[in-house]
């Protein structure tokens, strides 16, 4: 199975805002499962969803999502 | 409210779970009846019992599908629910599920091809319908298990 090359700080930002996954899902208008899969790196979100998550936290998308340099993308 | 979304999401998965249970029973009984016919057992009490089970599982399957379709219609009518419940994770898994459908259909066709070595399977319509049903079950099963594990 291919490793997800996108790491994120959703859990950190949720803790800072004291939000549950469900509360974040509500703000982004997706299901809790979707937030869970993104947060646990089981699913790479689209740019649109990444932007919506960043906007919900009032942060920049690159503050929340970073490329994991440890995972080769075959380049 | 997001609890509506979570509730509808759970309800959708519950309908899918029951559809899968009933469809699997239907498929087993369909194959049993197919091989009973080859053995001449369909007119016997055991064959009639299988037929009753087949009809009941078909009715339950239709009920699951109708309830699921009504739920989907409600979701489609509300753009907010539509966006939340048919989000990109769901769309991605639905696309991947077609691989499972292909494998399910191919697997069932190969099963009949293998069975041909031992039994005179000469009912192409039954083989085709069984293969399509197996593909449909595999498609939904893949989605259900992948989404449940999320």
Image (cartoon, rainbow, N blue to C red):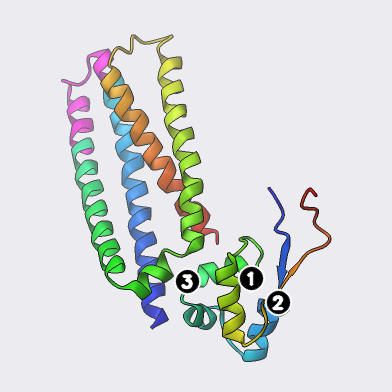
Asked if labels 1 and 3 touch by Cβ distance under 8 angstroms, the answer is no
Subunit under mark 1 = A
Residue B67 rendering spot, x and y as whole percentages: 24, 59
Asked if labels 2 and 3 touch by Cβ distance under 8 angstroms, the answer is no
CA separation, marks 2 and 1? 8 Å
Say which of A70 and A46 sits in front: A46
Asked if labels 1 and 2 touch by Cβ distance under 8 angstroms, the answer is no
Say which mark, if any, is on residue A9.
Answer: 2
In the current view of this chain or complex, which residue is farthest to the bottom? A17
Q: Using the image, determine if residue B49 lies above or below residue A73.
A: above
Could you tell me what secondary structure mostly forms the magenta stretch? helix
The residue under label 1 is: A39
The range drawn in magenta is B36-53
Subunit under mark 3 = A
- Name the residue: 53% across, 67% down: A34
Label 2: few (<14), some or many (≥20) within 10 Å? some
- SS of the residue under disc 2: loop
Tag 1 or tag 3, which sits nearer the N-term?
3
- Name the residue: 30% across, 29% down: B129
Label 3: few (<14), some or many (≥20) within 10 Å? many
The residue under label 3 is: A31
Subunit under mark 2 = A
Magenta segment includes B45:
yes
Tag 1 or tag 2, which sits nearer the N-term?
2
Residue B21 rendering spot, x and y as whole percentages: 36, 47
Count up the numbered dots.
3
């Amino acid at each position: 199975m291919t490793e997800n090359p996108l790491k994120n700080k959703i859990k950190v930002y949720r803790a800072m805002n004291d939000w549950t996954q469900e509360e974040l899902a509500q703000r982004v208008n997706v299901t809790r499962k979707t937030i869970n899969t993104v947060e646990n790196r089981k699913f790479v979100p689209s740019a649109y969803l990444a932007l919506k998550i960043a906007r919900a936290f009032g942060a920049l998308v690159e503050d929340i999502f970073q490329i994991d340099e440890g995972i080769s993308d075959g380049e | 409210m997001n609890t509506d979304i979570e509730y509808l999401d759970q309800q959708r998965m519950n309908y899918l779970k029951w559809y899968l249970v009933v469809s699997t029973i239907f498929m087993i009984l369909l194959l049993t009846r197919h091989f009973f016919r080859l053995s001449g057992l369909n007119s016997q009490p055991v064959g009639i019992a299988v037929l009753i089970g087949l009809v009941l599982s078909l009715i339950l399957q239709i009920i699951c599908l109708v309830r699921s379709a009504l739920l989907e219609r409600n979701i489609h009518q509300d753009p907010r629910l539509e966006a939340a419940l048919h989000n990109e994770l769901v769309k991605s898994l639905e696309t991947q599920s077609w691989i499972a459908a292909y494998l399910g259909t191919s697997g069932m066709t190969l099963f009949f091809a293998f069975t041909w070595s031992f039994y005179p399977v000469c009912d192409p319509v039954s083989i085709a319908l069984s293969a399509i049903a197996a593909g449909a079950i595999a498609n939904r099963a893949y989605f259900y298990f992948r989404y449940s594990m999320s």
